[in-house]
Image: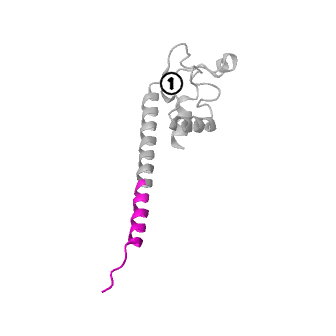
Amino acid sequence: FIYGLLGVSLFATVKYDENLTDHANFRSFGTALLVLIRMTTGESWNGIMADAANTDDCIDDQSYESREEIGIKGCGNYWSYMYFVSFQLIVALVYINLVVAVVLEGFSESAKEAECLIPVEMS
């Protein structure tokens, strides 16, 4: 959620390129969340990062009238590297924690089943 809002505020005016398209952009909160979900799968997140940092063939401070005439052609910024790498690191840590939790739960269940199978000694 926080990364979605941050992505919209940082990259909403970045021009479309090879990986930033109509279907993968940060121009609205909904599409930003969909792009982040897509990036958790590893689907061309580095290409989106490069497009969000692109400063070639763009207009730095584009006015509203210019956006209406020629469309959004804003420049990217170098915060994209920090944004995307930190997002990928956090997602990787969450996934690792999920895997560890599932494995530990499996060990716990198998230990409980093993206790049930051991016969109680009668004295």
Relative height, residue 116 to residue 110 (above, below): below
**Residue 50 at x, y = what percent?**
48, 23
10 Å neighbourhood of mark 1: few (<14), some, or many (≥20)? some
Is 96 covered by the magenta stretch? no
Q: Indicate the quadrant containing the N terminus: top left, top right, bottom left or bottom right.
A: top right
Total numbered circles: 1
Which kind of residue does numbered mark 1 sit on? Gly
Q: Which residue is mark 1?
A: 47
Residue 112 position by quadrant: bottom left
Relative height, residue 65 to residue 96 (above, below): above
Residue 28 horizontal side relative to residue 54, left or right:
right
Most extreme residue toward the left is 123
Residue 65 horizontal side relative to residue 46, left or right:
right
**Residue 41 at x, y = what percent?**
52, 37
Please say which color scheme the image uses. Answer: one colour
Q: Indicate the quadrant containing the C terminus: top left, top right, bottom left or bottom right.
A: bottom left
SS at mark 1 in the image: helix
Instruction: State the predominant SS element of the stretch in magenta.
Output: helix
Relative height, residue 65 to residue 37 (above, below): above
Residue located 56% across and 16% down the image: 59
Most extreme residue toward the bottom is 123
Residue 60 horizontal side relative to residue 100, left or right:
right
**Residue 31 at x, y = what percent?**
62, 35
Residue 106 position by quadrant: bottom left
Q: Nearer the viewer, residue 22 or 94?
A: 94
Q: Nearer the viewer, residue 79 or 25?
A: 25
**Residue 64 at x, y = what percent?**
65, 22
Most extreme residue toward the right is 69
Q: Nearer the viewer, residue 20 or 95?
A: 95
Residue located 46% across and 41% down the image: 91
Magenta span of residues: 103-123
